[in-house]
Image (tube, helix red, strand yellow):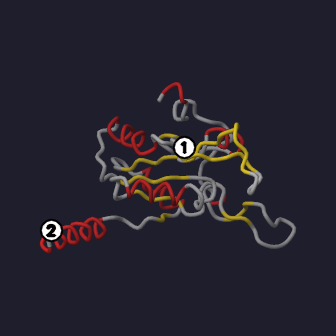
Amino acid sequence: MKRLFIAASLGLMALTASAVEIGISAQDTYAKVRQDGAKVLFVDVRDPVEIMFVGFTDAVDVNIPFLIVDRNQWNEERGVFKLNRNPDFAEQVGLELAKRGLGTDTEIITLCRSGSERGEPSAAYLRENGFPNARYVINGFQGSAIKEGPQAGLRLQDGWQNSGLPWSPRMNADKMFRPDRH
């Protein structure tokens, strides 16, 4: 029993030691995905409806929502529609890797609006489910909100949009999650 525990502990340490840091900047992400022959899967994890109103970067390989808006349920406490985790998220990421001939040890970078509610949790979830090199874009697509002054609350610092990286208000239909295609 003691040998089994030691072997399992060493295996876990080896997995942790080989995993990359979980957070990555928008600029570093863009540099990685633009490298010739890069073995990276860049996943926008926002609900497609959010992308429709906020914007999109075509540098992303695919949109697979981590949390999906349920417009039939209201969250009274937060004053928003309820968000449910996509039950097929890890499987859908795995299918995208397989389509590209990539393995589960591939670097996967997730992108959400701000990096906190879906970006980091989606990367952690992927790591827990057999993708040891999952990461997230720190500050996400829109960046963090300004804390004080006349523009307080607006997401005008950091993130993909505010870093001068390419984005558009238009969606790429070939990359968007659509339930009829999954």
Image quarter for residue 69?
top right
| Residue 167 x/y as whole percent | 62, 46
Image quarter for residue 128?
bottom left
User: Amino acid type of disc 2?
Assistant: Leu
State which tag comes first along the sequence, 1 or 2: 2
**172 left or right, relative to 30:** right
| Residue 4 x/y as whole percent | 15, 68
**Number of marks drawn:** 2
Residue toward you, 142 or 47:
47
User: Amino acid type of disc 1?
Assistant: Pro
At 46% from the left and 48% from the top, the residue drawn is 42
Is residue 57 depicted above or below 162 in this figure?
A: above
Tell me if I can see residue 36 in this picture: yes
Tag shown at residue 4: 2
Give the spatial CA distance, label 1 vs label 2. Answer: 38 Å
At 49% from the left and 58% from the top, the residue drawn is 136
Q: Quadrant of the N terminus?
A: bottom left
| Residue 163 x/y as whole percent | 62, 60
Neighbour tally class for label 2: few under 14, some 14-19, many 20 plus, Cα within 10 Å: few
Residue that badge 1 annotates: 65
| Residue 96 x/y as whole percent | 39, 39
